[in-house]
Structure formats: C-alpha cells, structure tokens
Image (cartoon, helix red, strand yellow):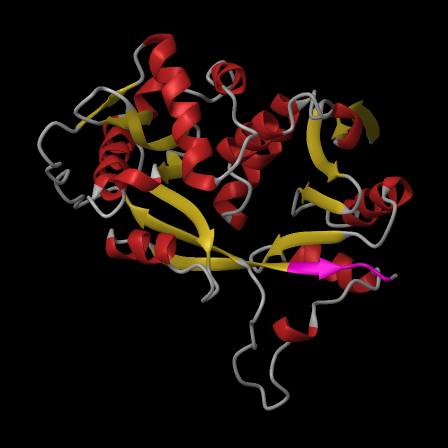
Amino acid sequence: MRRHEYAGPIALPAMQSLASRAFPTTGYRHIGDLAWNWCLCLDQADTSPTAVWTERERTMAWGWLELPDSLMLQIDPSRPELADEVLAWAEQSASGPLSVDVAETEPHLVSALERGGYTLPRSSRPRSSGGAPIVDGPFMACLGRPLTDLPAIPSLPDGYTIRAQQGHTDVAGRAAAHRAAFGSTRITTDRHALMRETCPYRPEFDLVVASPDGGVVAYCQGWYDESNGIGAFEPVGTHPDHRRLGLARAVCTAVLHAFADAGGHRAVVCARGDANYPAPKRLYESMGFTVYTRAHTYVGRG
C-alpha cells in the first residue's frame, strides 16, 4: 500500500476511479460530484491538500481536506482499516477538530469515526426511546429514480428554450446564472470553462434555459458515469428573476431524458433534507425521486 500526497486534488482521475467503483454500493460521492468540487477549489491548492492510497496502482482510499477543518474521504469497503489511516493523515494537517460527512450506506466509515472518538451533534442523535433521530441542523439527503417511465419534458413559457451551451457567451451566462442563483462568486466564466474540460463532462448533459432575450436564466448540470449507467445532477439553479416558471423542472427533466438516451438506468441527486431549505428536495420528489440514504456530519474531539 502506498500513500501519495498532493497540493489540491491533482489526482482527480484516481479518486474518481474509486468513486465509480464504490457508488453502486454506497450511492455517495458520484464522479461528477468530485469534478464539481474540483472546480470549486481551483486556485486553492494551499487549503485543499489531498492524499490517495493505492495498491498495485488501484485506488483503495482517498482524503480531501478543505482547511481548516473539513474532510471528505472515501474508502474501498473491502479495506475498511484504511479509514483509520486517512483520519490520522487529516488530523495531522487540520488546525482544529475535523468535521466529516458520511452517508448511512457507509457503515465502515461510521465505525472508523466512532472508533476515533468522533461524535454526532446532539441534535442528530437518536431519541432515547428508540424513535427517529431529532434533526435540527442542515443535512444532505440522497435521492434517486430509475430512468424508465420518464415524464414528458414540460412546456416552457413563450420565448424560453432548453439547449446545450453554445459558445463563450453561453458559458459566461451559465456562470452568471449560477452566481445569481446561489449568491456566490466562486463560479467565474474561466472556472466554468475549465470545468467543461474535466472528466466526465459531456455537453449534452449540461443544459441551460435561455430567456426570450437569449440570456441563460436556468440550468441543470448533469454528470454521467458510463461504467455504472448512473447520472447525477450537480448543480441545478434558476436566476431569481425567473423563478416559479417551471424552468428547473423542465431542464432537469430534459437531462433525465439525455441520461436515458445515453443508455443510463438511474439518476441521483443530493439535496438538503432538513426543513430549513425544503424546496429543492420537494422539486425532485415531485419528479419521481425518492430518498435512499442521507449524510451525517461527525465531529472530532476538541
């Protein structure tokens, strides 16, 4: 077993190879999620150290820190003991107690975290009576649906159209629409252009809605894992001035059809599962998605 350390997620293909292999079991960390996170951390290599563990050139584990104290990790379920090594590596670099998100479908990671003294916030612990957990804080729910019996793509208001991006103007418009939708400055035209060059990007899964004046006002970024036949949405957004027109539903449905046309059999998406931000989850559920797992955030000892 060898450990390789990097400044930033330079070894993205190696990390994606494990993500693709593990996804049918865990349903968490789609290869498209990693590509999107890579886009978000461009020019932040000094605060995004990564490490990859390989055996005979096969990726068995990886860790991805977002300093000062946040860790993403993935471990091949056949080698659960590597979780302890990844946590030890991360703890040496972090400046405080780590927070780590894992899915309920990753019991090998839950065991390692509990073994290392990591705990859930009180609001996420099960009730003493054995009832459902009390969940107050934000958490992510993972939803999926088969790519069969898809609904027809809804009609759009007059003058609005769905299409793939066409040239630099659309790339800039797509980046601007994301910034407006999420109040974020991280996605620039240049970042989005680089993301479009990152595996497994394919333009037929990255669809936008153009307004009557031709500007990009909504979008669904789809990522397709061809080896598993599973597509993922990440991200989806609508400009605030064009909401409540059914644009997100229409463009997401169009991407579902694109996944199916490519031979896919399942689509997934992660959305906030808590009551403080319910709209995206409700949208996906209305499109036939159902929750199959959720994430928990474990916190290390102070």
For the point 66% across and 42% down, the residue is: 76
Q: Which quadrant holds the N terminus?
A: top right
Quadrant in which residue 201 is drawn: top left
Res 65 seen here: yes
Q: Is residue 171 left or right of residue 185?
A: left
Q: Which quadrant holds the C terminus?
A: bottom right
Find residue 202 and report its horizontal and vertical position in percent: 38, 19
Q: Is residue 165 left or right of residue 41?
A: left
Q: Is residue 288 left or right of residue 128?
A: left
Find residue 138 and report its horizontal and vertical position in percent: 56, 61
Residue 136 vs 270, above or below: the answer is: below
Q: Nearer the viewer, residue 255 or 43?
A: 43
Q: Nearer the viewer, residue 77 or 89?
A: 89
Q: Is residue 93 magenta?
A: no
Residue 136 vs 144, above or below: the answer is: below
Residue 248 vs 46, above or below: the answer is: below
For the point 43% across and 58% down, the residue is: 292
Find residue 158 and report its horizontal and vertical position in percent: 8, 32
Res 51 seen here: no
**Dominant SS in magenta:** strand
**Residue closest to the far top:** 167
Q: Nearer the viewer, residue 181 or 49?
A: 181
For the point 81% across and 59% down, the residue is: 300
Find residue 250 and report its horizontal and vertical position in percent: 21, 39
**Residue closest to the far bottom:** 129
Residue range highlighted in magenta:
297-301
